[in-house]
């Protein structure tokens, strides 16, 4: 789940940003949520303090009780969250260089007179890459801790009472069911056959006659059933 956090005291402006997010996110099949705040207040601080580093912050530079830079400092310096992308949206475009001098890793600085819809859309693509870059699945098996990059996992398959995780052409095992592990994975891990999850993002093509999945890393296998074809083809995996 990706959370978009919009902080702007102008309701109309929040609506514009929210609509831009909805338009872009509805096309990429990722789970998301939009949270809105009208000021730098206790509710926002409470959200930031409990953030799981899976949020994208879109902040107005000037607010009734502070500004976007105050919020950015709260996120970065107080709560040590250097993973969440931060975007500043403001009418004060002359403060561009002043904002970047703060060394708060601001992703972008968007003027409210610009084409916000396009700029937000372009930034969302970057934000998703940033949030997914180091996303890993961590677990312990037979006393050994494993940390597997989600983007490297091609598929997960039931193997007796355990599962087999295939990533980077290596096999990893865990004592967990397919239904249980699915709860910890992004939505692009789709049930492709009984006891099998495939990473749609890593699929190159599927031969539905032979029921073979070909992955982008040249791995392949008999991993689909025709009963799951409709569900799989709802995703843009190519």
Image (spheres, helix red, strand yellow):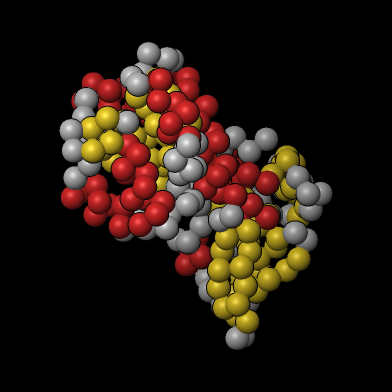
* Left or right of 89 on screen, residue 126: right
The image shows residue 172, relative to residue 183, as above or below, that is below
Percent of width and height locating residue 155: 66, 57
| Residue 96 showing in the rendered view | yes
Q: Nearer the viewer, residue 223 or 46?
A: 46
Percent of width and height locating residue 64: 18, 33
Percent of width and height locating residue 128: 52, 41
Q: How many marks?
A: 0
| Residue 162 showing in the rendered view | no
Q: Nearer the viewer, residue 94 or 203?
A: 94
Q: Nearer the viewer, residue 192 or 149?
A: 149
The image shows residue 57, relative to residue 148, as above or below, that is above
Quarter of the rendering containing residue 2:
top left
* Left or right of 233 on screen, residue 170: right
* Left or right of 84 on screen, residue 164: right
Quarter of the rendering containing residue 5:
top left
Q: Residue at the bottom extreme?
A: 143
* Left or right of 204 on screen, residue 1: left
- Residue at left 23%, top 21%? 12
The image shows residue 232, relative to residue 119, as above or below, that is below
Percent of width and height locating residue 66: 23, 38
Q: Nearer the viewer, residue 58 or 193?
A: 58
- Residue at left 76%, top 66%? 170
Image quarter where the C terminus lies is top right
- Residue at left 51%, top 57%? 185
Q: Residue at the right extreme?
A: 218
The image shows residue 207, relative to residue 112, as above or below, that is below
């Amino acid at each position: 789940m990706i959370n978009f956090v919009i902080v702007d005291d102008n309701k109309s402006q929040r609506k514009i940003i929210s609509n831009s997010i909805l338009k872009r996110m509805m096309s990429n099949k990722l789970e998301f949520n939009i949270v809105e705040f009208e000021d730098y207040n206790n509710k926002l601080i409470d959200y930031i303090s409990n953030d799981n580093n899976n949020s994208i912050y879109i902040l107005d530079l000037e607010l009734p009780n502070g500004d976007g830079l105050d919020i950015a400092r709260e996120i970065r310096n107080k709560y040590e969250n250097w993973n969440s992308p931060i975007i500043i949206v403001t009418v004060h475009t002359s403060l561009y260089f002043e904002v970047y001098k703060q060394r708060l890793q601001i992703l972008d600085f968007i003027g409210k007179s610009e084409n916000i819809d396009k700029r937000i859309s372009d930034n969302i693509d970057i934000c998703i890459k940033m949030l997914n870059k180091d996303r890993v699945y961590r677990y312990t098996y037979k006393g050994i801790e494993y940390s597997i990059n989600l983007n490297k996992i091609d598929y997960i398959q039931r193997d007796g009472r355990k599962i087999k995780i295939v990533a980077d052409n290596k096999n990893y095992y865990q004592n967990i069911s397919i239904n249980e592990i699915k709860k910890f994975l992004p939505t692009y891990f789709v049930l492709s056959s009984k006891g099998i999850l495939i990473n749609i993002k890593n699929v190159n093509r599927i031969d539905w006659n032979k029921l073979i999945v070909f992955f982008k890393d040249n791995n392949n296998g008999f991993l689909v059933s025709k009963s799951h074809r409709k569900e799989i083809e709802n995703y843009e995996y190519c």
